[in-house]
């Protein structure tokens, strides 16, 4: 479970799409310019988000990307999974079919798997409840605070 620029850029790209209002498609180069993300890398991220049905691509003149659902229904967890897969690998909690059955009887294995389970639950409690709509609200509050400091 390592979060990298991939997840950071992906979250920023989806937030940027949502901030544009969602009705008209937004071109990748516009997002890349606003967010200072290398466009080729952003295209890869948007392709992953499209395959996971977080965003939709619209072809042709005036085409680009839009959110596939309303900001209230898109969670941070959905975005992170689209970009990187499971947040904590299932094998850390349940083990693998290849490992001996006796491994599950070792107290240390049980304790460590319990910690992985707790960590997964805590992480999911955040990423599955924070939506893009909430991120938009935080963005507005941040901009208002920034403007108030500079007036």
Image (cartoon, rainbow, N blue to C red):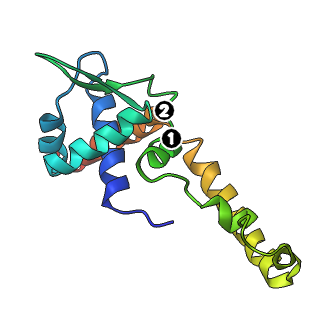
Image point (59%, 43%), residue name? 128
- Residue 67 point in image, percent of width and height: 36, 26
Which quadrant holds residue 8?
A: bottom left
In this rendering, does residue 82 appear at all? yes
Q: In the picture provided, is 107 more to the left or to the right than 134?
A: right
Mark number for residue 78? 1
Q: In the picture provided, is 44 more to the left or to the right than 88?
A: left
Q: Quadrant of the C terminus?
A: top left
Residue 4 sits above or below residue 64 on the image: below
Q: Are marks 1 and 2 in contact (CB under 8 Å)?
A: yes
- Residue 37 point in image, percent of width and height: 18, 50
Residue 55 sits above or below residue 59 on the image: below
Q: Secondary structure at mark 2?
A: loop
- Residue 107 point in image, percent of width and height: 86, 82
Q: Secondary structure at mark 1?
A: helix
* Mark 2 crowd level (few <14, some 14–19, many ≥20, 10 Å Cα): many
Mark number for residue 74? 2
Question: Could you tell me how many numbered marks the image carries?
Answer: 2
In this rendering, does residue 150 appear at all? no
What is the distance, in whole Å, between disc 1 and disc 2 at their CAs?
Answer: 7 Å
Mark number for residue 1? none
Residue 130 sits above or below residue 91 on the image: above
Q: Nearer the viewer, mark 1 or mark 2?
A: 1
């Amino acid at each position: 479970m390592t979060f990298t620029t991939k997840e950071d850029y992906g979250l920023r790209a989806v937030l940027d799409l949502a901030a544009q209002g969602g009705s008209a498609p937004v071109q990748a180069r516009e997002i890349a310019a606003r967010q200072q993300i290398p466009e080729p890398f952003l295209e890869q991220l948007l392709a992953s988000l499209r395959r996971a049905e977080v965003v939709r691509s619209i072809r042709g003149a005036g085409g680009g990307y839009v959110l596939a659902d309303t900001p209230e229904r898109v969670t941070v967890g959905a975005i992170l999974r689209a970009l990187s897969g499971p947040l904590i690998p299932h094998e850390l909690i349940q083990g693998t079919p290849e490992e001996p059955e006796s491994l599950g009887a070792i107290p240390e294995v049980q304790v460590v798997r319990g910690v992985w389970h707790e960590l997964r639950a805590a992480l999911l409690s955040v990423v599955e409840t924070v939506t893009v709509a909430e991120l938009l609200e935080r963005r507005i509050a941040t901009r208002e605070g920034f403007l108030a400091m500079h007036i």
